[in-house]
């Protein structure tokens, strides 16, 4: 058993500014749990085009508001109590509302190393 806090992670390389927010990678590959668990903050007013080619991801909203948009143009609101699941390596837009950060608990499978970050300034979707 072990215990880890946001404060613990903030002092390590597993606290990542991923471009449009931050991620505390609370569990990573080195923890041997078979998945990664993150406390993810999406910066208010931001938009990110994302696609995880090597990982499946599920995100559970615990605070703030935003939306996810698939490549067919369908938009889905994200509010506290909502989970969205990218079970087919789905390319998507993730947006946080303009007046508050969107805060998510994110789970990745297979697990992340813990230091990955996005390249949001490139053409196409950012992936890792």
Image (cartoon, rainbow, N blue to C red):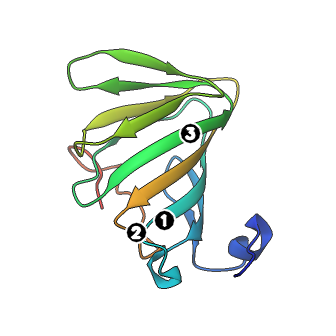
Residue 92 drawn at (x, y percent): 31, 34
- Number of residues whose C-alpha sits closer than 10 Å to that of mark 1, classed few (under 14), some (14–19) or many (20 or more): many
- In space, the residues marked 3 and 1 are separated at their CA atoms by 14 Å
Residue at image point 58% right, 79% down: 13
Quarter of the rendering occupied by the C terminus: bottom left
Residue 8 drawn at (x, y percent): 76, 76
Mark sitting on residue 122: none
Question: Where is mark 1, residue-wise?
Answer: 36
**Camera sees residue 101:** no
Question: Where is mark 3, residue-wise?
Answer: 60
Residue 59 drawn at (x, y percent): 50, 42
* The quarter of the displayed image where residue 86 is located: top left
Of the pair 101 and 122, the residue shown nearer to us: 101
Task: Point out the tag, 3 or 1, that comes first from the N-terminus.
Answer: 1
Tell me whether circle 1 and circle 2 mark residues in contact (CB < 8 Å).
yes
**Camera sees residue 42:** yes
């Amino acid at each position: 058993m072990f215990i880890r806090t946001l404060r613990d992670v903030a002092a390590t390389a597993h606290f990542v500014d991923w471009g449009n927010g931050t991620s505390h990678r609370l569990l990573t590959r080195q923890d041997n749990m078979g998945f990664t668990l993150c406390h993810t903050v999406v910066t208010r007013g931001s938009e990110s085009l994302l696609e995880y080619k090597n990982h499946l991801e599920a995100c559970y909203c615990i605070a703030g508001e935003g939306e996810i948009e698939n490549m067919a143009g369908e938009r889905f609101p994200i509010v506290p109590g909502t989970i969205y699941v990218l079970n087919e390596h789905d390319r998507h837009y993730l947006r946080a509302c303009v007046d508050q950060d969107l805060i998510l608990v994110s789970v990745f499978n297979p697990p992340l190393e813990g230091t990955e970050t996005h390249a949001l300034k490139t053409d196409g979707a950012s992936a890792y």
